[in-house]
Image (cartoon, grey):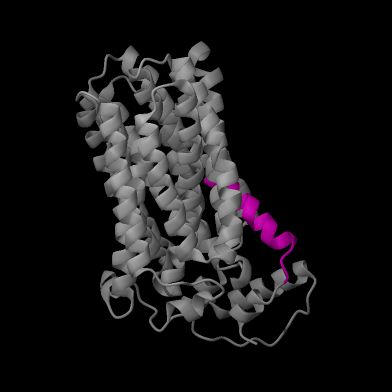
Amino acid sequence: MDLVSRIQRLPIGKFHYTLLWVIGLGWMFDAMDTGLISFILAKMAEDWAMTPDDKSWVVSIGFIGMAIGAVCSGGLADRWGRKTVFASTLVIYSLATAACAFAPNLTWLLVFRFIVGLGLGGQLPVAVTLVSEYIPAHVRGRFIVLLESFWGLGWLVAALVSRFIIPDFGWHTAFLIGGIPALYAFVIWKMVPESVPYLINRGRHKEAHALVKKIEAQCGVEVIEIFEVKPVAENHDISFSQLWSGIFARRTLMLWLIWFGIVFSYYGIFTWLPSLLVKGGYTIVKSFEYVLVMILAQLPGYIAAAWLVEKLGRKATLAGFIAMCAVSAYFFGQADNVTQIVVWGCLMSFFNLGAWGVLYTYTPEQYPANIRAFGSGWAAAIGRIGGIFAPFAVTHIMVLDHGFSYVFIMFTAVLVAVALIILLLGEETKGKTLESIGL
């Protein structure tokens, strides 16, 4: 039995759940950092008398860093290892976030936010690739959606920090709290194993075998002393051209379009939600409270997606959740009272974040081991380009009469287009091993 098959045959147990929560907490810190800026920006804009373009640059410069970080970290993870890059990116964005507290002016803040983006954008594609390569095919989708659910917890932490810290202690303190996760890198280094497919693809077969034996012992199954190695990819090299060759060209086109649309809509909506509500006449404290309620709605969205992704499959679940998010976004933009804002905001949050969980499942399933993190990183990077454009689109539309409504009509159109792309170009991957999909 080859090494990858031995990993796939392991019963779901303590090893898999430990991997989930250790990587998941890193994912949570990434989300907390991403969420903090949306709350901080609402107060910082007042203190620094920032123009709409200034605020747009604070958000967009982070996405420029995310795009570069996603591409670079994906390639580095396929060369240097998933574990190393995962831990390194966490340290980068945490320390840079803490440095934002000491920024003397907008220029320095933008420099630090760019570095934050490098780490944030680099961490998630690597994390999802690593977990995907350890989870058996029949529950892989469910585990990746559960991993993504830590994103909701991170935004919840960001909302709580912002609600109870910013009004009384200032936004500088919130930035300092965002630097604390750097200490978590020690936990990652101690508890997270390196990817077995990565080790095989780099020719480190004895190291891979020793790791598999250790995991087998932890899981209480027979430890096989004689090992067999099968290739996990046809090629061992990493190149951009592979993403656009053969069967991968259609998959890459689909992923790039999905990622651009979903990042454009998600960050356009949720990064600006506190500021949009303030502009709509609500106080900063009230807007934080409303967003906190909407964030809580993300958690059942993940649970529903985790169940449906293995029942209906990736394609139907992803397209369905995005389509329902489009409907919710439209009615949120038409809301004219608190009840409607909260109800439609919760539904929008429920479906949008459920869709994110499925997308993170679906993305690494499109590529073989040698370009899995690289391809996932490029898809995420194209998505970040959508995040760069979203703030400017929002700020320029908001100055129009009925701008709030127009902003969400725009997001509705983008989300409908994404759902159609999935239905037209997507392939179902439910229940298939990564090796059978990628080759």
Q: Quadrant of residue 240?
A: bottom left
Question: Visible in this render: residue 99?
Answer: no
The quadrant of the rendering that contains the N terminus is bottom right
The quadrant of the rendering that contains the C terminus is bottom left
Q: Is 391 positioned to the left or the right of 195 in the image?
A: left
Tell me which residue sits at (57%, 86%) in the image.
229
360 versus 37 height, above or below: below
Tell me which residue sits at (35%, 38%) in the image.
330
131 versus 212 height, above or below: above
Viewer-closest of 215 and 332: 332
Residue 396 locus on image (x, y percent): 20, 30
Magenta part of the chain: 11-27
Residue 157: in magenta span? no
Viewer-closest of 122 and 263: 263
Residue 18: in magenta span? yes
Residue 268 locus on image (x, y percent): 33, 38
Viewer-closest of 90 and 330: 330
Residue 325 locus on image (x, y percent): 42, 45
Tell me which residue sits at (54%, 76%) in the image.
433
Number of numbered discs on residues? 0
User: What kind of secondary structure does the magenta stretch mostly adopt?
Assistant: helix
Q: Is 307 positioned to the left or the right of 36 in the image?
A: right
Residue 309 locus on image (x, y percent): 55, 62
Question: Visible in this render: residue 266?
Answer: yes
Q: Quadrant of residue 213?
A: bottom right
Q: Is 335 positioned to the left or the right of 135 in the image?
A: left
